[in-house]
Image: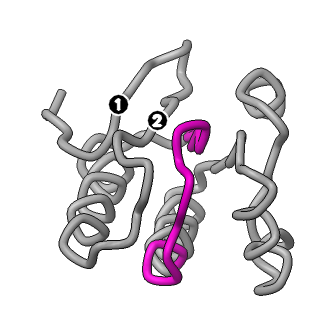
Amino acid sequence: MATYRRLVINEIGDVTVVHFRDQKIIEDLRIQELGQELYQLVETENRKKLVLNFHSVDFLSSAALGVLIKLDKKVKAKQGRLKLCNIRPEIFEVFKITNLNRVFDIKPDEADALAAL
């Protein structure tokens, strides 16, 4: 398994649970690294069931939302499934404003996300 600078990866059965190392995902370079690491999970490591746990994330830029949209497309192209969980209310509001809450399956916590897979 690869080494990740921006992510903490846990395996629960056949599900890959991703936690973010950064509290604020706003810097372009870090967002690019984050995207590369997330895409690698799907494209190189062929992981098809992903849970992204945003528990430690306080702020997410619009560029980071773009990474998530691209990840969702990659997961769906591999017939995989992606769940998001533990999104803070102020970040969830951005998902609602941009209608991304309709694109992503967002669960209140990790247990619900795992159960949905």
Query: Which percent across, then down, holds residue 29?
Result: 18, 73
Spatial distance from mark 1 to mark 2, Cα to Cα?
5 Å
Q: Nearer the viewer, residue 87 or 42?
A: 87
Q: Quadrant of residue 21?
A: top left
Q: Residue at x 56, y 53 (%)?
A: 58
Magenta part of the chain: 50-65
**Quadrant of the drawing holding the C terminus:** top right
Magenta-colored stretch includes residue 63: yes
What is the number of the mark on residue 8?
Answer: 1
Q: For the view shown, which residue lies furthest in the top direction?
A: 13
Q: Is residue 59 above or below residue 100?
A: above
**Quadrant of the drawing holding the N terminus:** top left
Q: Is residue 19 left or right of residue 115?
A: left
Say which label, 1 or 2, has the lower sequence index: 1
Q: Is residue 76 left or right of residue 106?
A: left
Magenta-colored stretch includes residue 42: no
Query: Which percent across, then down, holds residue 8?
Result: 35, 31
Q: Residue at x 71, y 27 (%)?
A: 110
What is the number of the mark on residue 19?
Answer: 2
Q: Amino acid at mark 2?
A: His
Q: Is residue 97 left or right of residue 8?
A: right
- Would you say the residues marked 1 and 2 are in contact, meaning their CB atoms lie under 8 Å apart? yes
